[in-house]
Structure formats: C-alpha cells, structure tokens
Image (cartoon, helix red, strand yellow):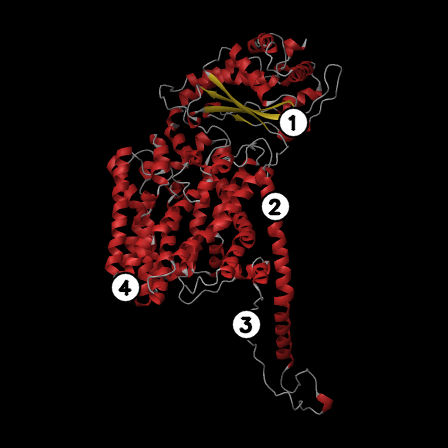
C-alpha cells in the first residue's frame, strides 16, 4: 500500500549519501572548529561571500591527505555494499540494504502528518512501486537524478542530475494516480548545525520528483528520513529548491519592459528623424561634391564629356578641382527635435565609435581604463565561477600557491587604478576650468553633472537586471531567485540612488560591485576641498592633499592593527577576519581615498605644467625603475600571504593596508606623466591605440553589467564547471567580448541619450 511505500527513491539515495559522508567526515581533522568554513552555502552566493571563498578553501587544504583519502574510500565502500550494482538493484527491497528498511519504517510517521500532501505521497509511492517493477518510465526518473561520483573525499558533493530529461518525463494516469510530470529539485543539507551561512559544508543533490510535490513536501520527506536514520543534529535540512520553468512577473519586470519599449521607440523615432531630416540632406550634398570631383579632369567637362565635340568647357564652369567643403554638423531646431535626436542610434553610434581626440587630451588614459576593467572582469570571472565549480577544493589551493596567479588573486588593485584615474581627470579638468574662469565655478552644476552622468544608466541597469534576469536562463544550477541580491535591490535600492550603499545597509547591498560607485561619488563630493586650494597657491593645494592622505593612512593603519586585518580579501578569509576587513576597510571611503588623492595631485601637475615637464634620461630611467618596482611590490609582494606559507605580521599588514594602494597609484601616475612628457615609448603608443578610445568609453556600462553576464553564464551550465587555468582564460575572453558588445548597445540606449539630454536642457552648464 502507498502509505508504506511512498518514500521517494531520491530520498533513499540522499539519506545514504548523508550517512556515508558523515562517517567519512568523521575521519577528517574535525578538531578544527573552523573546518566547516570551506564550501559556499549554495549556488546563489552574494558578491561578498564569493570573494571570501578562495581564502576559506586554501585555509583547509591541508586537511585532506592520503591517509584520510584512503580511510574515506574504505568507509564508503562498506556503507554502499550491496547497493551499487545498478538502478534496479538499488531499487530492490531484498533486505540487503538496511537503509531502505529504515526509510520504510519512517513512512508511517510521515503519513500521519497533516502538513504533507496526499497527492505527493501517492505519486511518490506510485513512482517507487514502478521502479521496483522495473518499468522503463520510472527508471528514467532515477536516471535523471544526480549520482554519487568520484572525489567525495575532495568534497565533490554537489550532484547534478539531468535537468532536461527530468522535465521531459510524463507519467500516464492510472487508477491510483492522475499522472504527473517530472520536476527537478535540488535537495540541500548541511553537515552540522546551521549558524553562519558561509560556515556550512553543504551537500546538494539534484533529484527528479513528481511535480505534485512542493518544496515543503520534499523537505518534510527528507527531514523524516534523516530523523529515522538517527542523524538529528548531525545533518541539518536546508530549504529545497524546485527548479520550475515558470517565471513570476514582478513590478520590476513590468517596469523593465516599459523602459525597454519606451527607449526602443525613442531610439527608432530619433534615428528615423535624424536620417531623414538631418543626415540625408547632408549626404546628398556630399554625394554631389564627390561626383563633381570625380567627373572633373583634364580634357573633360564637369559633366564628364566633350561639349558639342569642340573640346572646350562651358564658359560658366571654371576648370578647377573642387575641394570638399567642410559642412557644419546638422543641428535640429527646437528642443523637442533635439531631445529626439539625443536617442538617435546613428548620431550616438558615430560619437561612440569616433576615435579622434582633442589636442590637450591625455591619450594613454583610454588604454589604462580599458585594461583596468579587463583586470576587474578577470578577477570576477574566477570568483563568480566558484559557485558552480566541481573541483573547487583541489584546484583553488593549487592556483593560489602559484605566484603567476597573484595577478588574479590580488586583482583588487585594479579598483585602485580606477580611483586614481577618477581623481586625476576630475582635478585635471577642474584646474583647467579654474584657470579660465576663476575658482568660483558653478559648483552646483559641478555636482549635478556628475550625478546625472552616472545615475540614470545606473538605476536603469538595476531595474533591467531586477526585472529581466530571471528570464535569461534555466537548468540544474539556475537559482530560482534572480538576481542573487533581489531582496536587497527591492528593499534598499535607495542606498544606491544616494550613493551610500557602502555605508548604509552595506551587508545588503544591491549590485555588489556598486560599492565602488558609492566611494567614487563620495570622493567627488569632497574633491573641491583639495582642488580649490591649488588656485590660490600650489602649496595650499599640496598641503590639503597631504593632510587628507596622511589622515587616511593613519586611520587605516590603526584600524588594521586593532582589528587584526590581513593584507587582502583572500588572506583575510584565511585568518577569519573577512567580514571586518570587507565592510570596515575594503568598502569604506576613509580607507580607500588614498589613490584618489594621488590622482588629484597628478591631475593638477598635468593641468598646470603639462607642456613644461622636461625629463632627462637619468630622471626618466630612475622614475621608471622606481615605478615598476613599486607596482610589482604592491601586486606580487603578498606571495607569502596568498600562498599561505609566510603570512605577514600584524605590523606589516597594517603598513601594507595603509600605504600599498597609494603606492600603486603613484606608480600608475608616473606612467601617465612619462607618457605625457614623451618618455612613454612603446607603452604610450600601446595605451594610446585608437581602439582603446572607443573601448574606454564603454567601461562604465561594462562595469555595471559584467557581473550579471557572469551570473547568467555560470548558472546556465548543465553540469558543474571544471576549474582549470585554461578554462578560466577561455571563459574570461568570451565574457569580455560579450560584455563590451552588450555595453555598446546599453551605451546607445541608456548612457548616450542622458548625456545628450543634459546638453539640451542645461545648455548654460559649460558657460557657467
């Protein structure tokens, strides 16, 4: 009868795994209380927890030695004796499987619970009975369920089944059941009590269940099975995740669709108006000039023939080679027409793809900006992939022990490059304006321009991701909660709008990488306090910057010593101080402003003495040598920390945290000064390469969307990702190309129109 046989075979498999793996874990060095802080809690890790994962892994890499590996395999062999011969044997009730009897004994208690679904129990019982009878359709459910594979001692405990096969299964109705379809569900259980979500060693198992079973039903079945097996307290049941194809439209989804429709209509109308009324008349003039230039030549009339065979020209057409006239750019009349053209794909695309630069521009900045974001994407590709990696425990420690991998493990310096460039450009442009108009600029417009330049695209991207990302994938690794920070975006989006998400509800940040934008805006707000003194006296400006920089360094050093901060995010997760390091140091403006200040000083120097910087060979050689040594020390000087063999002392870590980022900024600023002054050589030639001008314009949109693309890519995998250096490199290059391709579209639809609208409705900004 179904009340005694309605336990799913998937639950039996799960119970066997949990019992066997618990015994295996007991053979490990469980005396370390922090041992469980190894694997992420789920595939839906937050941005912060993803950054912490590599350090937790290398911290416990030494727990797994050859003896433990052998002991684990022996225990697994004994526990699975008599159950591993095949699907039909595994479904047998011959009595050689004590766990099957245990599961059967728990059915009566489960059937008495009012909270369980009768239909789920009946359908599951029908499935089990059909498996025992070796019916093909029932065995396919088992076939679609994840299987125990090799590497249990290496914590390969995420067992992914066949998602597509499961969803394709349909059971015909019978006298006992109405029929059901396959539903792919991820069962989750933590070894030990659930305390810190990051400190859980969690088993995940993809099982194919009847679609009549809800997540609550499956949790009850699993919990009862574990209780009967005597695993209470040893194993904690976590919420199951039912991977359904249905998607629930949210208010953000409606808003995103409306935004796309409105912007799409404006882009179409603006492009059509631009081409018909502005570009077409200009093109006709240019075509006429080109045709005239081609047709005029020796011995021919302007029309390309001999008039009347006489060989002479018309008297009213002089024999000249027409030069192409410099036609002024077409300008629409009226604000409405101008606003419409602000959405023109043709005009905006021409501007974005234009590689020409002003004579006084700092050309090498474009290459630095693009390469810095490339570095950011590389680091995020590595950490984002960890949520679905199969060989995470074995491969990550190997990579972190290689000095060549330090550029990825310590990729956080790429953010300091952006802080440096931001401070340099703000100072450079503002100082030039103050030289022309005095220090009493329109500071209100100074702030509004920055807010308008960043905020509309920023907020629109959040709405689009919040509303549409859930429709961008499916599969066994695809989380039903999309994006992963959905709750934070829904409740605390206003912290992003006000650029305080690094300080207010920082642990619930929406769009995890946006902490940088908050810092950058906060630095921009106080930048006049460091820039204006330069107008009155250079010494005043240097003194102001020195005070800010020294204060930041002292505060950082003291806090680092008091809180025992390590040197990087990776090493802080090894030492157990990750949360304090990330939220009290890594995202706080008073600890991260150093590179921005170095950029402000450099920007002033370039704005006031750009054409007067004269370097000699000894000075240039010395400068390059010091800059290269400083940059390498900041990047590769943490080999002992990242590798875990020789961690820095408390004092050295405090010194590094307070000085290293500013030192990196100084090395980068020397590179820029050398390029501007003619001592950049091939470095300047490369960084000033014209395609970098276009790619540099796309970095803002690329920064906003690249994490979303990484989420979509990794969670759309049908199987776990196998981590190797080559796989990461290929994935990174593909994501990089996709990010910039999509950024170009977002630039045309979200960013460029906002810039055009500002110029239309605030035309006095530049005059003021």
Circle nearer the N terminus (3, 2): 2
State how far apart marks 2 and 4 are (Cα). 60 Å
Q: Secondary structure at mark 3?
A: loop
Q: Is residue 180 above or below residue 653?
A: above
Name the quadrant containing residue 512. Answer: top left
Q: Which residue is mark 1?
A: 166
Circle nearer the N terminus (3, 4): 3
640 left or right of 4 in image: left
Q: Which residue is mark 2?
A: 258
State how far apart marks 1 and 2 are (Cα). 35 Å
Circle nearer the N terminus (1, 4): 1
User: Picture coordinates of residue 731 (x, y %)?
Assistant: 51, 42
In terms of depth relative to the viewer, which is nearer, 45 or 487? 487
Q: Residue 29: which disc?
A: none
User: Picture coordinates of residue 611 (x, y %)?
Assistant: 33, 67
Q: Secondary structure at mark 4?
A: helix
Going 37% across and 27% down the picture, which residue do you hit?
A: 62
In terms of depth relative to the viewer, which is nearer, 288 or 34? 288
User: Picture coordinates of residue 411 (x, y %)?
Assistant: 39, 43
State how far apart marks 3 and 4 are (Cα). 46 Å
Q: Which residue is mark 3?
A: 328
State how far apart marks 3 and 2 are (Cα). 37 Å
Which quadrant of the figure contains the N terminus? top right
Marks 2 and 1: in contact by CB < 8 Å? Answer: no
| Crowd tier of the residue under label 4, counting other residues whose Cα lies within 10 Å: few below 14, some 14–19, many 20 or above | few
Q: Is residue 288 above or below residue 445?
A: below
């Amino acid at each position: 009868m179904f009340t005694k046989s309605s336990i799913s075979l998937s639950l039996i498999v799960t119970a066997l795994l949990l019992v066997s793996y618990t015994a295996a874990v007991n053979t490990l060095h469980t005396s370390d209380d922090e041992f469980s802080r190894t694997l992420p809690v789920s595939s839906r890790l937050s941005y912060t927890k993803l950054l912490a994962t590599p350090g937790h892994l290398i911290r416990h890499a030494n727990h797994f030695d050859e003896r433990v590996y052998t002991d684990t395999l022996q225990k697994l062999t004994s526990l699975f004796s008599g159950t591993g011969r095949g699907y039909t044997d595994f479904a047998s009730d011959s009595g050689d499987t004590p766990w099957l009897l245990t599961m059967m004994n728990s059915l009566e208690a489960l059937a008495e619970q009012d909270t369980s679904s009768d239909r789920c129990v009946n359908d599951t019982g029908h499935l089990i009975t059909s498996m025992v009878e070796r019916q093909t359709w029932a065995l396919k459910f088992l076939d679609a369920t994840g299987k125990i594979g090799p590497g249990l001692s290496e914590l390969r405990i995420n067992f992914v089944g066949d998602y597509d096969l499961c969803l394709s299964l349909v059971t015909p109705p019978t006298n006992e059941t109405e029929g059901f379809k396959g539903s792919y569900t991820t069962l989750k259980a933590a070894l030990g009590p659930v305390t810190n979500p990051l400190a859980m060693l969690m088993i995940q198992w993809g099982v194919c269940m009847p679609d009549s079973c809800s997540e609550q039903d499956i949790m009850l079945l699993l919990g009862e099975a574990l209780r009967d097996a005597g695993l209470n307290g040893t194993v904690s049941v976590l919420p199951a995740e039912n991977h359904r194809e249905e998607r629930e439209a949210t208010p953000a989804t409606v808003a995103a669709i409306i935004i796309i429709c409105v912007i799409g209509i404006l882009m179409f109308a603006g492009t059509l108006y631009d081409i018909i009324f502005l570009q077409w008349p200009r093109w006709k003039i240019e075509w006429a000039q080109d045709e005239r230039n081609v047709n005029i030549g020796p011995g021919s009339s302007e029309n390309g023939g001999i008039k009347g065979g006489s060989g002479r020209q018309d008297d009213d057409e002089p024999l000249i080679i027409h030069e192409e006239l410099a036609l002024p750019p077409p300008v629409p009349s009226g604000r409405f027409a101008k606003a419409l053209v602000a959405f023109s794909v043709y005009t905006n695309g021409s501007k974005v793809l234009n590689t020409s630069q002003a004579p006084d521009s700092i050309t090498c900045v474009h290459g630095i900006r693009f390469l810095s974001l490339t570095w950011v994407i590389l680091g995020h590709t590595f950490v984002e992939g960890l949520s679905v990696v199969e060989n995470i425990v074995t491969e990550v420690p190997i990579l972190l022990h290689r000095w060549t991998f330090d550029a990825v493990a310590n990729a956080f310096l790429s953010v300091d490059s952006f802080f440096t460039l931001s401070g340099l450009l703000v100072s450079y442009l503002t100082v030039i304006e103050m030289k022309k108009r005095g220090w009493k600029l329109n500071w209100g417009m100074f702030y509004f321009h920055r807010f308008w330049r960043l905020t509309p695209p920023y907020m629109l991207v959040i709405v689009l991701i919040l509303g549409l990302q859930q429709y961008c994938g499916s599969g066994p690794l695809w989380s039903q909660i999309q994006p992963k920070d959905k709750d934070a975006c829904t409740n605390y989006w206003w912290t992003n709008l006000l650029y305080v998400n690094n300080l207010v509800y920082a642990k619930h940040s929406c769009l995890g990488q946006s902490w940088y934008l908050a810092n950058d805006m906060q630095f921009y707000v106080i930048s006049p306090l460091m820039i204006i003194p330069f107008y009155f006296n250079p010494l005043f400006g240097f003194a102001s910057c020195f005070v800010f920089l020294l204060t930041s360094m002292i505060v950082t050093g003291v806090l680092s010593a008091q809180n025992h901060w390590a040197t990087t995010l990776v090493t802080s997760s090894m030492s157990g101080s990750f949360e304090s390091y990330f939220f009290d140091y890594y995202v706080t403006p008073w600890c991260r402003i150093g590179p921005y200040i170095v950029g402000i000083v450099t920007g002033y120097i370039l704005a006031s003495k750009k054409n007067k910087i004269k370097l000699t060979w000894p000075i240039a050689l010395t400068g390059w040598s010091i800059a290269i040594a400083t940059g390498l020390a900041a990047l590769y000087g943490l080999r002992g920390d990242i590798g875990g063999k020789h961690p820095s002392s408390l004092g050295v870590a405090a010194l590094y945290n307070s000085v290293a980022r500013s030192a990196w900024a100084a090395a980068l600023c020397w590179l820029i000064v050398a390029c501007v002054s003619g001592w950049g050589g091939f470095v300047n030639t490369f960084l000033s390469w014209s395609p970098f001008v276009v790619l540099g314009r796309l970095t803002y949109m690329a920064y906003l969307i690249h994490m979303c693309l990484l989420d979509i890519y990794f969670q759309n995998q049908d199987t776990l990702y196998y981590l190797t250096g080559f796989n990461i490199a290929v994935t990174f290059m593909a994501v990089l190309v996709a990010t910039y391709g999509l950024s170009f579209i977002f630039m045309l639809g979200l960013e460029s129109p906002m810039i055009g609208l500002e110029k239309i409705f605030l035309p006095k900004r530049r005059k003021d």
